[in-house]
Amino acid sequence: MIEAATREMFLRLMDEYQGAMARLAGAYMNDPADRDDLVQEIATAIWQAIPRFRGDSSERTWVYRIAHNTAITASGRVRRRFRTEAVLDEEFSSPAANVDERLVQEQQRALLLARIRALPEADREVIVMHLEGLSHGEIGEVTGATVGAIATRLSRIRERLIHELK
Amino acid sequence: MNSNDELRDLWQQQPAAPVRKGEDMLTLVIERTRKLDRQIAGRNTREVCGALFVAIVFAVMAWNAQGEIERLGWAITAASGIWIAYYILRFGAGPGRVDREASVASYTAVLAEGYERQIRLLKTVKYWYILPQWIGVTVAMLGSWVRLGGSAMAAIGPALGWAFASAVCVAVWMLNERYGVRCLVRLKAELPRND
């Protein structure tokens, strides 16, 4: 018998975070089926963790901790399966000139995702949370790093990404 | 691309992946949880059944052995099956269900510790896995040779059996210490570093 409160919290969390989870999964997995599987795995981990949630941290950082930890395990599994590095498609390397703005944006989005996937995992998790709007303090709560270390790391990654996307 | 805000907008405007209704996701999640529980129960059952099977087979061989030394050898092999099952259950648990609510740094530290434990386990496989069985088979083959008369001709069958068992032991040793350890070291090295 599923406790009504657990069920209610799960449904609310899915409503609130499923989009963010899908974007996060995109930063870790190239294949759409793997991405979908990761979203389900994160949801399962959240479902199993809800009865233990005591509110010691904010709900948002709690969800992101579970999501990133699950993604770390899942991406290791996928690496073992393929043992090949994600290939950065050449087509992403330079948005062609004279194409309309929407196409440029699509190319930039694809390039951004490819660049983020190519980052070391520790950098990837930090930038994904930053892009999702988490504060340095919240990112620190999720990763266990200090606010200062997060700020330094983020500044380096941001500069690199902005430079690569120019 | 000039600013952080543009970067964030670009990220947030990703085409939305098909989002499941909460109820559908709940159904999927419950099924995955049950499947995981079944997998864990199945794995534990297989490990215990495998060890029991080995123990029973060699216990029957010990019971039916025609010489005392041979009987002792098969009894050692049967006992080593039970010892191995105990050792795996006691020390062999990998980084299975680690608390995913921990910070990423703590989580990866626990995963790394789990890999380290498994690496130690595989590096010592020759002592706790191979040696007891090899001793049992060696004693049994020696007993078989003694029972058959102790002559050079009588040594051929037991010697071949011993050579085969030793070759299997060496293969298991190499697989674990070379291949298994290398895989685990690579997995450990791939864990994110938050320093």
Image: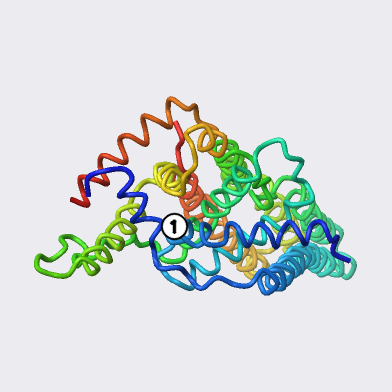
Residue A1: where, in percent of width, then height? Answer: 89, 66
Which residue is at a point 57% across and 35% down the rendered structure image? A141
Disc 1 marks a residue whose amino acid type is Tyr
Closer-to-camera residue (A61/A114): A61
Category of crowding for the residue at label 1, using alpha-carbon neighbours closer than 10 angstroms: few (below 14), some (14–19), many (at least 20): many
Check the image and report above or below for B175 versus B190: below
Name the spot of residue B7 as percent of width and height, x first: 32, 49
Q: Secondary structure at mark 1?
A: helix
Residue A68, percent from left and from top: 54, 49
Q: Position of residue B139 (x, y in %)?
A: 74, 55
Which of these two is toward me, B169 or B14? B14
Q: Is residue B178 left or right of residue B5?
A: right
Is residue B61 rendered to the left or right of residue A78? right
Residue at the spot of label 1: A28
Write the residue at 60% across / 68% down.
B160
Q: Is residue B117 left or right of residue B132?
A: left
Q: Subunit of mark 1?
A: A
**Location of the C terminus of chain B (image quadrant):** top left
User: Residue at 71% across / 55% down in the picture?
Assistant: B133
